[in-house]
Image: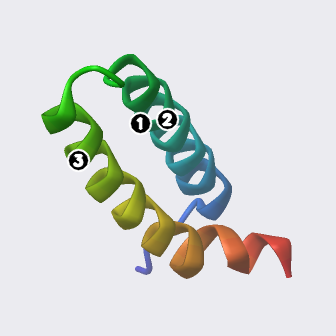
Amino acid sequence: MSAQIDIEAIDNNIKTMKKAAEELSQMGDDFPAIKRNTARILASIKMLEINVSDIIDL
């Protein structure tokens, strides 16, 4: 039995995480630690986009 992977659901979750991280980053304009950490989070999300979301766009 093989497991089905719902790429579209994964893509939607990635987009949700990206939106949340971007909003948090804006909220952290006066809080350097939040700004730095959200930049790291967004870099990791970018890797997810490259690995998953870009496949959907093909």
Q: Amino acid at mark 2?
A: Glu
What residue is pinned by disc 3?
Answer: 36
Task: Pinpoint residue 26: horizontal percent, then vertical percent.
Answer: 45, 25
What residue is pinned by disc 1?
Answer: 21
Number of residues whose C-alpha sits closer than 10 Å to that of mark 1, classed few (under 14), some (14–19) or many (20 or more): many
Find the residue positioned furthest to the left. Answer: 33
Give the quarter of the image for residue 29: top left
Q: Earlier in the sequence, mark 3 or mark 1?
A: 1
Comparing 9 with 43, the one in front is: 43
Q: Is residue 7 above or below residue 29?
A: below
Q: Secondary structure at mark 1?
A: helix
Q: Secondary structure at mark 3?
A: helix
Q: Which mark is residue 22?
A: 2
For the C terminus, the quadrant is: bottom right
Q: Amino acid at mark 1?
A: Ala
Q: CA distance from mark 3 to mark 1?
A: 11 Å
Task: Pinpoint residue 47: horizontal percent, then vertical percent.
Answer: 45, 74
Q: Are marks 1 and 2 in contact (CB under 8 Å)?
A: yes
Q: Is residue 40 above or below residue 25?
A: below
For the N terminus, the quadrant is: bottom left
Which of label 3 and label 1 is nearer to you?
Answer: 3
Residue at image point 23% right, 47% down? 36
Find the residue positioned furthest to the right. Answer: 58
